[in-house]
Amino acid sequence: MKIVTTESVSGYTITVHLGTVVGNTIRARHIGKDIYAGLRTLVGGEIKEYTTMLAESREQAMERMVQRAEEMEADAIVGVRFQTSMIMATTAELMVYGTAVKLSASNQ
C-alpha cells in the first residue's frame, strides 16, 4: 500500500478514485504522565510522555486508515492529512484521512 501526502503517485496513473478513508483514535491523558510532564515543564525540554503517546496514536490511526483502504482493494492512499482535536479537557482525537485509489503503472 502506497501512502502519500501528494495528490498523485510518481510513476503511476490513478485509474479509479474509491473514496475517502479515515482512521482515528481517541486517547486520554494519564495522571501519572501528567505529573511527570508538569515537572518537565518547569525545567524545559521535550515532554517525552506525550511524544510517545502521540506517536502511538498516529500509528494506530494510520493502521485503521490502511485497513479501510485494503477493504476497498485500493493500491494507494493519496492526499493524506492528519488532524487533532480536543474532545474533553483530558482527551484528544487524532485522525488521519486520504483518498483510496487504484493505480496503473505510467507508460513513461
Image: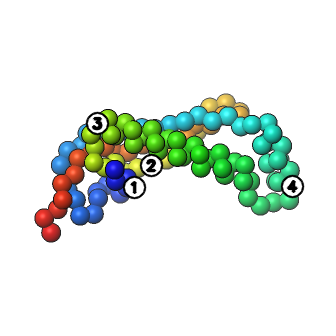
Q: Are marks 2 and 1 in contact (CB under 8 Å)?
A: yes
Q: Residues within 10 Å of mark 2 (few under 14, many from 20)?
A: few
**Distance of mark 2 from mark 1, alpha carbons?**
7 Å
Q: Provide the secondary structure element on which disc 1 rests.
A: loop
Asked if marks 2 and 3 touch (Cβ < 8 Å), the reply is no
Instruction: Decide if residue 73 is on the left or right side of residue 88.
Output: left
- Whole-number angstrom distance, CA of label 2 to CA of label 3: 19 Å
> Does residue 85 appear left or right of residue 18 in this picture?
right
Residue 17 drawn at (x, y percent): 24, 43
Point out residue 78 in the picture as x, y percentages from the top left corner.
34, 51
Give the CA distance from mark 1 to mark 3: 19 Å
Q: Residue at x 22, y 51 (%)?
A: 103
The residue sitting at 23% across, 64% down in the picture is 11
Residue 105 sits in which quadrant? bottom left
Residue 10, compared with residue 34, is above or below; it is below
Between marks 2 and 4, how big is the CA–CA gap?
33 Å
Helix, strand or loop for disc 3: loop
Q: Of the numbered discs in the image, which one, if any, rests on residue 5?
A: 1
Disc number at residue 81?
2
The kind of residue tagged 2 is: Arg
Q: Which residue sits at x=57%, y=43%?
A: 57
Q: Secondary structure at mark 2?
A: strand
Q: Are marks 2 and 4 in contact (CB under 8 Å)?
A: no
**Residue 78 in view:** no
Q: Which mark is residue 42?
A: 4
- On residue 72, the disc is 3
Q: Amino acid at mark 4?
A: Leu
Residue at coordinates 79% horizontally, 42% vertically from top-left?
A: 34
Mark positioned earlier in the residue sequence (1 or 3): 1
Tell me residue 6's x, y (percent).
35, 57
Q: Check the image and report above or below for 38 versus 44.
A: above
